[in-house]
Image: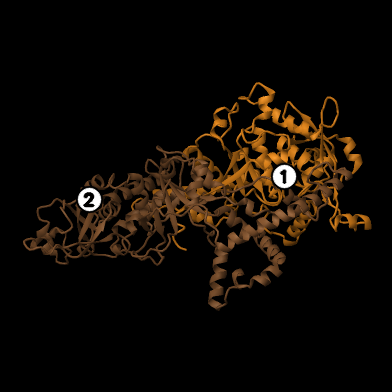
Amino acid sequence: MDQDEFKIAQNNSDDSDENDSAEDEVPDYRQLASFTNRKSKETYIPRRGEKEFEPSGLKIQQKALDESRDAMFNAIDGVRQSSNKNISIGLWSNAHSRASIIIQRGTHFSSIGHPVRNTPSKREGNVEKVASETRMELLPEEALYMVERGSLLCYEYEWSDNNDKMLKLSTNDSAVDERVAGLAPFSAQRAFDCCIGKDGLTLEKYTVYAQLKRLGYIVKRAQQQQIKPGEQPGLLGRIYNTLKGIVNTIFSPIASFVRLFNFRVTTLLGSRSSFLRPHQNYDSIFKALRLTPWGYNDTPEVSTRLSEEQQHEFDVTWDIWRPSSKFRKSAPPPPDFRIVVVDTHKSSLPSLEQFAHIFSHQPYSQPPLTRKQKLAKEKEEKNGKKPELAVSEISWFSRWWNRKQLAADESNRKKSPAVMFPALKHGKRAVVFAIVDSGTTSWIQFGEGQFGEFPLY
Amino acid sequence: MAANPPPRNNTAHKRIKQHQNRIYANPLPVLIDQRPSTFLAGLSRFGQKSLINPQCVGVYIKQTQSVWVINERDVRVLWTRGFFGKGSLSRSEPTWNDRQRKLAVGDKPQPTAEEITSKRRIERNKMKIERAKVLSEAQLAAEAALEGSDSIKLSPPMPADDNDNLPLNEKSSNPIEPSSPPKWEPLEPDTQEEQQDLSNAEHLQLTLPEAFFLAWGIGCLKIVDPYTDAVIPINQLWKECRLASMFLQNAPDSRDTCLQRLDNPFLVNYAIYHYYRSLGWVIKSGIKFCVDIVLYKRGPVFHHAEFAVVICPTYEDQRDKESSPFDLHNSDKLSWQWLNTINRVNGQAKKTLILAYVQIPSQEKVRNLDDPAKLLAEYRVKEVVLKRFVAARNRDN
């Protein structure tokens, strides 16, 4: 892959993304010189130098500065080349906002583009207008990205319908050269001009798209899936709820009577706080103090207050997959992350109702494993050990019989720092915002908080 | 995470840990009676244990909107059991007396938190000066080499390489934490004579949410009126706390409005305070990190604050917002710039930022504000957790 060109750029822009220690470091640009002179293409990350804040008046500093500057100019100066063997050829139509591929080369198409089936007309007299049955079309961001990275040579051509013979897929270079002879090829500028603003693609969205693609992610337009807010409990759940209701109505008068008695006792004892009754331990004191409800369970009611526009203001823009994921275009797995692109100049933080709305459309997710946990898991897999029985595999009777023990185990598990902190920091459901401020992007993941789920006592 | 020194001496470190665990064993000022209960008590309570109430006393000072705890035993109880309050002459833990006595008598071997910090700052400064010296020496040497052989192709100076060999360097990589917790516990049982020599000028100050939580929630603090010396009953205190909001810049001019409003700043803050306290977190002011509160797992002695919380009030009924006499912070639209600023500060301090939205119940729905417990159940807390997403680091599973 010729991703290394971008690595330099990445190292510049990534500065802000590194943590504190890297903050003081800048790339040593002199390394660029050796990079641009290189013949072989291997992955290469320039070494970082030390940041200097003021002129020391020493020649050595001036020399380093000059060398860095020259190296940068040289890097920009370099002619970008691409081998014919890797360039695909396509036609761009402004009317359709799509590029149609005529010659398909390279590995990009495993994740880029979508097939379009033609309906070749069988009528006589129309013999010339028969194109191949399926061809590849690119969305504006895909076409622009391919052009920008030098993998696609694109000509402007307005096709009338899908059966235009200009669109016919080919592998013959000279034939295609003939076909596109009269057409103007895209420059990078023209590509931006044509693709940005088409089909909802803003410059901000493209910036984020290109950034992720360069890092190797698979990026697709998000499918606005319709997850119904608040999943309906199954039949068993409903039966359980009804039974619970019945039991509650029977027993609540008894319980309140007992409580009344209990209250009497405590007032006689002269306790000043309504919570300061005899307690088993601190856990029960803290539990009695928990009065305020938490969480987004009441959202169906709240999100109705949003207008249609407010509901869609923060729709997910890109679904992305890690480079290592087993991605199939025809049947994409659930995305690894969902990215919402926002423009700082046009929006502010989502309101609480909007957050609720956003979360309700995300699937529940587990926090990523820490390095330690990952190692432990790998080791276990190596040893061929099977994970312990999942709770659902134990019969309901033994679960019921051991319910107190199970509940205690669960609450202890939740108190372990290795479980609690990742869960609190990740949240129940999460979505990533790419916040673009005039070309600079900051990335923040918003998670649905669940502190109430993990009490310390 | 843990604020303890690197385990230079493991046994000493362990001893300090044990010492801390003993002193700060209780998360609340009330103690659970571990004595075997009498037959009668056992009968009536089904094995439940009674609580030992320390019965602390505080004075409500209206002018500073705080409650002062002056009695030294009470100060120690409230600090060691749940880390309530702040020393009026100290950064956090009330250590003024110890520092003074040390100056006068010089007998305390264990340094206080403030002393540890200042010592560390001096050391760090020294280290920086030395590092700069080594750096400039390296540069001068390189310069000399350049002068001597201008024609020879010279490799650029790599001061970082030289620096790596310095043992000093590793100290600088420690994360800097502005409010570093104390490492030793200086509060030992005092000997009485010393106390008479130097009277303690320091008191413990409690914020109103802290005071109300202790007085009402736990029931271990009596709050008295400084003029009459009479104990303020809980329902009166509940009113006083809400009336304190009348001293704000944008405040209603009538007492009744102030008492009736559900978006009273005290109520909003108390709802959050009570919520996180009831989950077991120790809460301290977050002013140093541009946020409202920070959450400690067991207390500032054990860990750095892990979470920084911004309180964002929202209204269940928008009409209440329009009619509000208060100007609640962060209740309007928040800008991305604001968010990035705060997130940046807290990212540097290795804290996770939380937006804690407090849903204020509709004024129409809730008429009776007299019962704190019932009222708190009407509010609702919804959190949004923030985390920086670094695409380059999340690439590999």
Q: Position of residue B239 (x, y in %)?
A: 73, 30
Q: Residue at x 73, y 47 (%)?
A: A289
Task: Specify whether B273 is left or right of A317.
Answer: right
The chain identifier of the residue carrying mark 2 reads A
How was this image coloured? by chain
Chain shown orange: that is B
A79 versus A203 height, above or below: below
Which numbered disc, 1 or 2, marks the residue closer to the eye? 2
Residue farthest along the top direction in this orientation: B253
Quadrant of the rendered image containing residue A180: bottom left
Q: Position of residue A313 (x, y in %)?
A: 42, 43
Q: Nearer the viewer, residue B62 or A270?
A: A270
Q: Which residue is mark 2?
A: A96
Q: Residue at x 49, y 53 (%)?
A: B160
Residue type (three-letter) at the residue carrying disc 1? Ala
For residue B113, the mark is 1
CA gap, disc 1 to disc 2? 69 Å
Q: Nearer the viewer, residue A41 or B316?
A: B316
Residue farthest along the right direction in this orientation: B39
Q: Secondary structure at mark 2?
A: loop
Q: Secondary structure at mark 1?
A: helix
The chain identifier of the residue carrying mark 1 reads B
The colour applied to the residues of chain A in this rendering is brown
Same subunit: marks 1 and 2: no
Q: Nearer the viewer, residue B163 or B113?
A: B113
Q: Is residue A18 visible?
A: no
Q: Is residue B92 visible?
A: yes
Quadrant of the rendered image containing residue B355: top right
Task: Specify whether A406 is left or right of A167.
Answer: right
Q: In the rendered image, which quarter contains the C terminus of chain A? A: bottom right
